Image: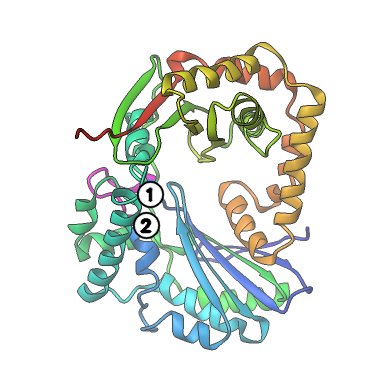
């Protein structure tokens, strides 16, 4: 992939890749701020800003209408590490995208009314997703069980509803001016637009946005876990559920890709181990999944599933542990490993065909290292060996390194 890069005098990093097979252009801005940058008593702010950024900016009272009138679309998402905004627009109207996104980077239209509206939206989302949905509070239960000091111990939506309910306009303004800065962001532009036009429009619209004093990140490091952590809760849900997590390395660690492959060996398709053994053959689970959190700091390998009718959570956990022990005792076979690597490669290739996906990925890789890493993901996965997988499994799947949540169906007394 041909990647062009440029850094503006205000610190904004620009990455670009041209794709003439489409008549559209994508702009993706990733801000280096997520839930991990929040104060423990003021959580949910990064997610609140995902909404506030669409509530009007200094010179543009309505973000959506001019973009939609130009044939464009937009959206955003937040996680514990970053906040990501993107839009797509026909190439003939591309300057509208630069105009819109640069103005809200400059300054939002802060007002009590805008804050009240977006705060209400986020509060309803919190209630709908976390309080009124089966298993919705799993993140609020698992995270503080797995993390004792690191800010990954609360979900992106916030630790508790009161943090958003009590957010003041001054606190919101302070959060914006600390983190939403050109020198704390990467802009990726892809699609049918030349490098020369991209640089010219970026300098024209983003160049005047002033650099800000972004505080250095000083996050507490999570100490090594030394004993198993367990929790059992009862809730009015249709089925019991088992949640098991194991602390793992950060994204920069050489073993990160081994963890990614281990999760795929366990659960990526019907022929993966957990699906084949525990769902199809032994019929101990009705569904089961394994994945890694993919976080920048030390993350978690998750295993979650719902036992089949008549199977206790204790029996279900023992069955999962047998599969994990097999990974510790016997190296993954060459054919199985190759199949997992091939599947990852095809997913990567197809994922990077779409110009919008490329914009999102370029921004992420430039933020966390360099944009060119987008072309190195496959080889880094390919470099993982069966011996490395076995070593990582033995180091990870230990009882004292486990976090287990039994999520039980509430039994009503008649």
Colour mode of the rendering: rainbow
- The answer to whether residue 382 is above or below residue 358 is above
Determine whether the residue tagged by mark 2 lies in a helix, strand or loop.
helix
Residue 180 or residue 386, whichever sits in front: 386
Q: Is residue 306 left or right of residue 153?
A: right
- The answer to whether residue 270 is above or below residue 332 is below
Q: Is residue 168 left or right of residue 273?
A: left
Task: Please report the bounds of the magenta region as a residue range.
Answer: 36-45
Write the residue at 39% across / 83% down. 62
Residue 336 x %, y %: 77, 28
Q: Is residue 342 visible?
A: yes
Separation (CA) of disc 1 from disc 2: 6 Å
Name the residue beneath numbered marker 1: 156
Write the residue at 62% across / 34% down. 267
Dominant secondary structure of the residues highlighted in magenta in the image: loop
The magenta stretch spans residue 44: yes
Q: Quadrant of the N terminus?
A: bottom right
Write the residue at 41% across / 73% down. 104
Name the residue beneath numbered marker 2: 47
- The answer to whether residue 368 is above or below residue 291 is below
Asked where in the image residue 288 lies, by quadrant, the reply is top right
Residue 367 x %, y %: 56, 52
């Amino acid at each position: 992939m041909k990647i062009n890069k440029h850094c503006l005098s205000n610190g904004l990093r620009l990455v670009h890749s041209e794709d003439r097979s489409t008549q559209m252009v994508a702009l993706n801005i990733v801000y280096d701020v997520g839930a991990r940058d929040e104060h423990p008593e003021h959580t949910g702010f990064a997610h609140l800003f995902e909404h506030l950024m669409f509530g009007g900016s200094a010179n543009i009272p309505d973000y959506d209408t001019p973009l939609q009138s130009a044939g464009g679309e937009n959206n955003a998402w937040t996680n514990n590490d970053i906040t990501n905004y993107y839009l797509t627009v026909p190439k003939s109207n591309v300057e509208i995208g630069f105009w819109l996104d640069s103005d809200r980077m400059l300054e939002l239209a802060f007002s009590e009314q805008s804050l009240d509206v977006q705060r209400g939206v986020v509060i309803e989302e919190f209630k709908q997703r976390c309080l009124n949905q089966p298993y919705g509070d799993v993140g609020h239960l698992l995270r503080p069980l797995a993390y004792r000091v690191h800010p990954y111990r609360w979900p992106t939506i916030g630790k508790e509803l009161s943090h958003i309910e009590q957010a003041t306009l001054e606190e919101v303004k302070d959060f914006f001016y600390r983190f939403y800065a050109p020198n704390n962001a990467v802009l990726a532009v892809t699609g049918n637009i030349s490098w020369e036009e991209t640089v010219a429009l970026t300098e024209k619209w983003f160049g005047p946005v002033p650099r800000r004093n972004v505080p250095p990140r000083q996050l507490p490091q999570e100490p090594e876990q030394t004993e198993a952590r367990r929790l059992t809760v009862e809730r009015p849900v249709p089925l019991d559920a088992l949640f098991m997590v194991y602390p793992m390395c950060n994204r920069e660690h050489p073993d990160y890709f081994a963890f990614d492959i281990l999760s795929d060996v366990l659960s990526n398709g019907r022929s993966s181990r957990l699906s084949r053994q525990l769902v199809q053959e032994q019929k101990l689970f009705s569904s089961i999944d394994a994945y890694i959190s993919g976080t920048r700091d030390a993350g978690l390998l998750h295993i979650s599933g719902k036992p089949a009718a008549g199977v206790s959570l204790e029996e279900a956990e023992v069955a999962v542990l047998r599969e994990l022990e097999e990974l510790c005792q016997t190296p993954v076979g060459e054919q199985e490993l190759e199949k997992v690597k091939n599947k990852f490669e095809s997913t990567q290739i197809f994922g990077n065909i779409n110009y919008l996906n490329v914009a999102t990925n370029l921004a992420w890789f430039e933020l966390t290292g360099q944009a060119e890493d987008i072309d190195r993901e496959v080889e880094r996965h390919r470099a993982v060996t069966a011996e490395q997988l076995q070593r990582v499994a033995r180091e990870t799947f230990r009882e004292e390194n486990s976090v287990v949540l039994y999520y039980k169906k509430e039994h009503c007394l008649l």
